[in-house]
Each structure stands twice: as C-alpha cells, then as structure tokens.
Amino acid sequence: MILNIAFPNTKIWLTHIMSSLCRNPKLHHSLYNILCIANVVSHTYRYERLLEKARQQVVSPESRLLRNTNIWNISVIDNIDFIEQTYAYGNIFDTTRRSVHATLRMVFQFTLPMQIQHCNPINIKAFNGNNLSIFGTSDFTNNLLSLYEEMFQNFLTTRVDDWDADNILKEIAQKIPMGCKVSHPNVVILKPGDNPNCNVNVHNACDMYYGDVGIVNTGCLDIACDEAIFRRLISYKDDNIDKNVRPLLGQWHTSRDMCIVLINVFSGYGIANMAAKLEVRFLDKLEKVVDYQATCRVLELIWVAVGIAIFKYLNNKNLTISDIKSGNNNILKVWYHYLCWAGYWIGHKIGIRQGNYEMQIRNLKAFSPLFPVTGKSNYARSVVYFLTYVEHDPHLQELLKCVCSVNLTQPGHYFAFDEALERFGVKFVKQNIGGKIVSDEELSLQISSVQTERERLDLLISEYIGDTVVVREERAVQSRKEVLWQLANELLSAFSLEDPKMHDIFLNAPEITSIGFSKLFTCYDNGIPRLIDIQKQDVYQKVSRNTIGRRKHDVGVHKLSENQSKEMRKQRINRNLTVDQVEDNTTEQQEGLATEHKRQYRITKDNEKEILENLFKSKSDSFPQDEAIEVLRQLQDSSKDWNMQRVRNYWNNHHKRK
C-alpha cells in the first residue's frame, strides 16, 4: 500500500496479483488468509465468524423502531429464499440443491403531519352492499380517458411525428398531482417468520407484529403483501375480528397481473404480431411477464402506437370517438378497447409512481372486471376483498391518501409497498448476508442483524468510496421511435382498409371473427356481475357460496408462443414459393405436419397486374405504403384473395425489374 502511494506509476507484482485475486469469488477465502498472515486483518476467518454470531445473539431490531404518536406503521411481508450455490458432495443427478425459505418481515414507519385517529374494528359481514357498486368505470376514469385523447391530439397537431412514447407518457404523468407528501420512512427489518407455505406460518408471522411493532397509534395492524399471502390473510382477518387486521393488496404485483390480463384478452386479436413489429423476440417471456419492466415497455409502446393510429384515423375521416362505438369497423373497436383498458393500467401505474391514491384505486376499480373474464379467479377474489375493505373503512382511506406508496431513492419517484420490499428489502438482505446458510435458525439470526452489520461496514465504505445509493437516476431505455411509428402507420393502413383483417398485421389472429368480436365487446359488462357475485358470496356472505364457473373465460385466450410457432412453421412450408405460386393452407399444414400436399396455384390476372403497376410509379426503393392501400382496395373489388402481405410480396419480387 505504501509503495503504491509513493510510486503510483510503478507496476508492483503483489498489488496486481491481489487485484486479480479479488475478481475471483471462489478464492476470497484464500485472500482472507493471505491478509491474515500479513496482519492486514486482526484475526482468522473462523474467529470472525464466531464474533459475528456473538453480535447476532445480542441484536434487537425492535430497538430501531420509532414510537411517536403520529407514526403510521405499514408492515410488509413476503417470501425470501436462499439456494445453495453448489451441489453437495455426492451424485448431482440424485441430489438437488437445498433451499431455505423464510417470511421476510419489514415495517415502513411514516411520520404524518397530523395525529392519527384510533380506528375501531369493522365487521365487513355486517354491511349489506345491495346498493353499492364499486366495480367498473367512473367519472374519474372517464376524465382520464379524455385527458389521453387531449394529449394525443395535442402531440399530433403540434409535434406531428417528432415524438415517441416517453414524451407523451411523461407529459401525462406531469398532469397527475403528486401525492404522499411525507418524509422518507424509517425502514426496519424485523425477525423473520417461518416458511410462508401454509396459513399457520403466515398467521404466526402476523402475530409477531403485535409484540414488536404494536397497534397503539391506529388500533389496527396494516399488512401489505402480494396476492398469494393476501389470500392467507383473508382467513386470518375473519378468524381474528378482535385483532383488527387490515390486509393491503400489493399494487406492484397487481400491476404485473394486469399486464398478463391485457396480453390474454388481446392474444387472439393480433397483439403478438404487434409485439413482433416492435422487435420482441421471446413472446413466451412476454406473456409470462418474466421481466416486468420490459413487458410494461412493450405494452406502453403498443398503447401509444394504437393511440396514434386511432386519432390519425379519426382526423383523416373527420370522425369522433362516439363514431367508433357506433360504427361497423370491428377491428377499430377492438383496439379502441385496448386504448381504454390499457389506459386504466397505465393510470394505475402512474398512480404508484406519483404516490396518488385516487389514481391507484379508481383505475383498479375500472380494470377489475377484466380479471374474472380471463379466468384469473384468485386475483378477482383478492381484488374484490381489497376494494371492499377500503370502501368501508374511511379511516384507511384517509391514511392512504397521505401515504399510498413509498419513496426510498429520489424525489418524485415512488414504489408500491410490495415493490419496495422486493427491490430493496429482499435485495438488501441477500447482498449483505455472508457465509453459508446451514439452518433456518441461522438464517433468522442473520436477517435480524443484517441492518446492524451493514452499519458497521458503512463507516469504512462511506469514508473511502462515498455513501451507497441504490438508485441514482432513471435507467437508460431505448426509445424505439422508428419501430413505434412504423407500427402506428401500419395500424393506420389497416384501419383504413374496407376489410382491415386482410392486413398482414392481423394475420393468424384466431379471434377476428364475428363470435370473437362479440365476446370482446361484451366481456367487460359480463365481468362486473361476476365480481358482485364474489362480493356477496365471499365477502358479505349473504348468499351461499358457489364457485362453479369462476374460472370460465369470457374471451378467447391464446398462447403467443403457439401463434409464433405456427407462423414459423408456415414460413418454412412456404419458403420456396413465389407470390404467384402459393401453397394451399390446409388444416394439416397449419398443425405443422410434414406430409406432402398438392399445391394450388394462384395466377395473377392481367387486370390485376395493371392495377399493381401503380406501385412502381414512385420509383422508390422502399415499399410505397400509401399507394399500396389504394391498390389493395381496387384488387379486393375483383378478388378477396388479395391482402397486404400478398401485395408486398409482389412488389418485393418485381420492383428490381422495373
């Protein structure tokens, strides 16, 4: 160290080898032994482990809690698991890596600007609910849709095509008032509970909060969690009326499931083709929402492209939104529904990021009828319970208006309670737990002391490399402006056709039929009475419980990956065929069978060739989209075999000869 400071430009062997050694995690134990021999560290690795255990035995995480009368405690619980990094000695084909699970318990302590009123227990079953309809749209969400329309029209008028999805989404977010105007919360990681794989363990983890956090200020135990644990807390609340528990459904996990619902609803209407136009490669990952941020990005891009196409179409035709609803362009109606329903999801997401309670709860109510119609019975039931709890608890409503999201990183950027636990609580624990986890008891000790142990290290870390900040700024994201406008222009071309389903963007869309249109246009209205039935049977318990048909799909749900596989098989079958020699698409070929079939030839007639000559008047090297629309209209007057894909293929095969 001294030589490096004195001669910074000199290459010293020892320091270079130490740098290489630090990059190999498997040799960190050897590095520690070297530092111990050189007296850089005070004692051996084994002795440090003994000292760490001794410190863990005396740590009391409850001592970090604030006890003021204006503190609102929001408890958050979730599963945390650790998997062995390597296989144990023995046959790896017979032995799986062992995992350890626990219930991570955290509490966010918000200092409110007023004294918190004490809340008495509320018996939900005592309410009738016959005259209460909390599901579906409202004046608030209708005004939000009007705001979207105003923003699209404004951008198309003032900026024409010099903008992308980020511009309009940021402009919309700026129109939404910021909520949660309180200081950063005090975050405490408490002693964990057992594996949350059964009701007993989850209920015991909740009981632990009464001992360490208490319910002195509000008289209620407010617990935020994901949907899987929320279902277990329903029975806990029903069985413990005197304890006054208020389960809060995690809005981040809810937003994730809203993405899945949107993809399922429109899976049969061409959303896979639109995602492919946006250069999405792994559709199976998209429909499972493996990456929440990436899935949100794709759905937002599709929403903006659909909005551009719809409002440009209305401007070109001199129409209004009401004309779409009363018109006979069914595909345009389908994607106007996407504009509305995805708009509720975007509004809910903005509500989380802005900390706006009204945006979260009103958009969740508007979106909720789509959960049962796609077979999401568990989420439908949990959303019904959560919305009913909030609706009948004015005390909880006032608290959520003050704090409905948590700010941990930067001003004006909020996270849902369950999202903050996932992104920072679970991540923080896993990054700061050292050594090998050998038992549930040892895991419990390490989680309980993780904050104290990190504070010991922060003094050294902050002295030399500065304070650690988890999120410094918004991460860089590709704007995808070019593909966004290409998709918007193709949608506009499709909407402008007399038969939009002939456009290649709607090829292989199985629900573009009269039955499919009818299902989509009626599913939202069908979802509301299904939610009301769950409310009456499960929440109020005024009617005998009947679960038959709760998983029924009111819309056709298709796997995007299956559509992608069919399209790839079809492309392989038709790879060597020209435009004038197209193989007949039989049922067996669509199933990907390799059996030889007799080809059926489609001959381009002379009058069709004369119409197609209009494509080559521009002498351009790029496909003339506007001329192609007019050409396709003329061709479809004489034959219904023509679609945009066939026109494009004809141009690809003949434009170089011209």
Image (tube, rainbow, N blue to C red):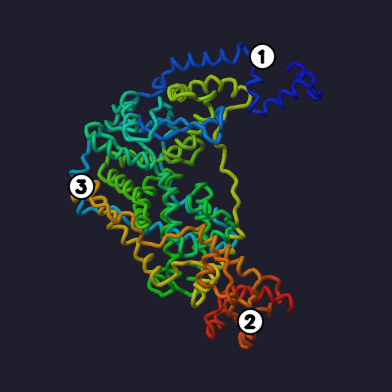
CB atoms of marks 3 and 2 within 8 Å: no
Kindly identify the residue that appears in the image at 42 percent across and 39 percent down.
418
Kindly identify the residue that appears in the image at 47 percent across and 74 percent down.
318
Q: Quadrant of the C terminus?
A: bottom right
Mark 2 Cα shell of 10 Å, populated few (<14), some (14-19), many (≥20): many
Mark 1 Cα shell of 10 Å, populated few (<14), some (14-19), many (≥20): few
Q: Which mark is residue 612?
A: 2
The residue under label 3 is which amino acid type? Gln
Mark 3 Cα shell of 10 Å, populated few (<14), some (14-19), many (≥20): some
Q: Quadrant of the N terminus?
A: top right
Return the disc, 1 or 3, that comes first in the chain's sequence.
1
The image quarter containing residue 210 is top left
Return the disc, 3 or 2, that comes first in the chain's sequence.
3
Could you say where residue 603 lies in the image, as x and y percent from the top left?
Answer: 62, 83
The residue under label 2 is which amino acid type? Leu
Q: Which residue is mark 3?
A: 541
Compared to residue 496, the image places residue 235 above or below, namely above
Query: Can residue 430 be seen here?
Result: yes
Residue nearer the viewer, 540 or 566: 566
Kindly identify the residue that appears in the image at 59 percent across and 64 percent down.
486
The residue under label 1 is which amino acid type? Val
Q: Which mark is residue 40?
A: 1
Q: In the orientation shown, which residue stands out farthest toward the bottom?
A: 607
Distance in Å between CA atoms under marks 2 and 1? 82 Å
